[in-house]
Amino acid sequence: MNYKIFDAHCDTLCLLNDLGASFEKNNFHIDRRRMEQYDRYTQVFACFIDPVYKNSAMERFIELSDTFYSQNIGGILSIEGGEMITSLKVLRSLARQGVRIAALTWNSSNHIASGVLEPDKNRGLTEFGKTVVREMNRINMLIDYSHLNDKSFFDIANISNAPIIATHSNSRAVCGHPRNLTDEQFKLIVKTGGCAGINFYPLFLNYSGHAGIDDIVKHIEHFMSLGGERNIGIGADFDGVDYLPEGIRGCGEVYKVLDRLLELNYTEEQVNNISHGNFERIFYGG
Ligand SMILES: [Zn+2]
């Protein structure tokens, strides 16, 4: 296929690690065999710290990153859940391990910030969290805003000088789920030259639990209407969700979304920006 893809979030590392499966070929949403059908497929692999590992977060990170390196996976390493960031020294050490982007919380709160399920709407970035954000800026580790509650989102946006990235979040105006971005948040993404990765999970697409490719397109259309032509990417959430939209079984079918955009008279340049260019500009510069 003549597409280049950059997908900013998947949870495949957890499955590979926990089930001892192979990255070459498997029954998950992502494997090397299907990625190689494309001209180029760059994937950000998250080390997701499930809450059951909150007291052994560093050990969990080490195991997942070992799977990433020992299976020679390639792509980009990220963190989803900052429980292991207990000091700025640890943070810098994670950067040296290859972590380019980090979500500081998953859905609940921790010593850094608050996630979308935090019941206290006024709980946001902590004092320690402020030092983490400033150090991430300094060492050029990107911040993933996807799972933050609104207070933490704006607290971090207020002090960070890096582009705002939500690796796997849709539009709340299209589907009113708290994991999705408000128009105000997306406009800040545009303003800072950041990017939002469109999440393929049906519950974040239309709330009904059943979705198709046109539901994905609706979120792209809405972000386009807010001036986001250079701020929309893909963050399908493969292997982090229990089911996908009709017609999509995994990374082998991402092309169908791009085909649909071309059918709708999006230009090749616009489709290339969405498929990979917008995220690549942030991760690789240019
Ligand atoms: Zn996630």
Image (cartoon, rainbow, N blue to C red):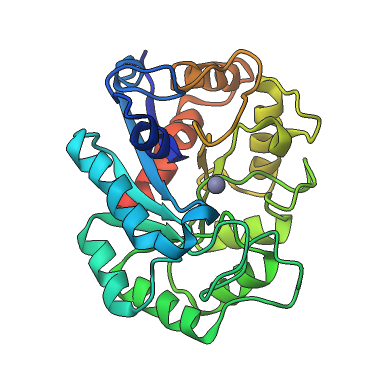
Indicate whether 263 appears above or below 176.
above
Q: How many marks?
A: 0
Compared across the picture, whether 101 is left or right of 220 comes to: left
Compared across the picture, whether 272 is left or right of 67 comes to: right
Tell me the residue at 49%/35% (across/down). 274
Tell me the residue at 32%/78% (across/down). 88
Residue 183 falls in which quadrant of the image? bottom right
Tell me the residue at 49%/64% (across/down). 104
x, y percent for residue 250: 49, 21
Residue 15 falls in which quadrant of the image? top left
Q: Is residue 265 visible to us here? A: yes
x, y percent for residue 232: 54, 43
Indicate whether 119 appears above or below 33.
below
x, y percent for residue 23: 30, 25
Tell me the residue at 26%/40% (across/down). 67
Q: Nearer the viewer, residue 94 or 40?
A: 94
Q: Nearer the viewer, residue 59 or 260?
A: 59
Compared across the picture, whether 143 is left or right of 245 comes to: left
Indicate whether 186 appears above or below 192.
above
x, y percent for residue 53: 46, 56
Q: Is residue 284 visible to us here? A: no
Indicate whether 36 appears above or below 141.
above
Quadrant (top left/top right/bottom left/bottom right) for the N terminus: top left
Residue 149 falls in which quadrant of the image? bottom right
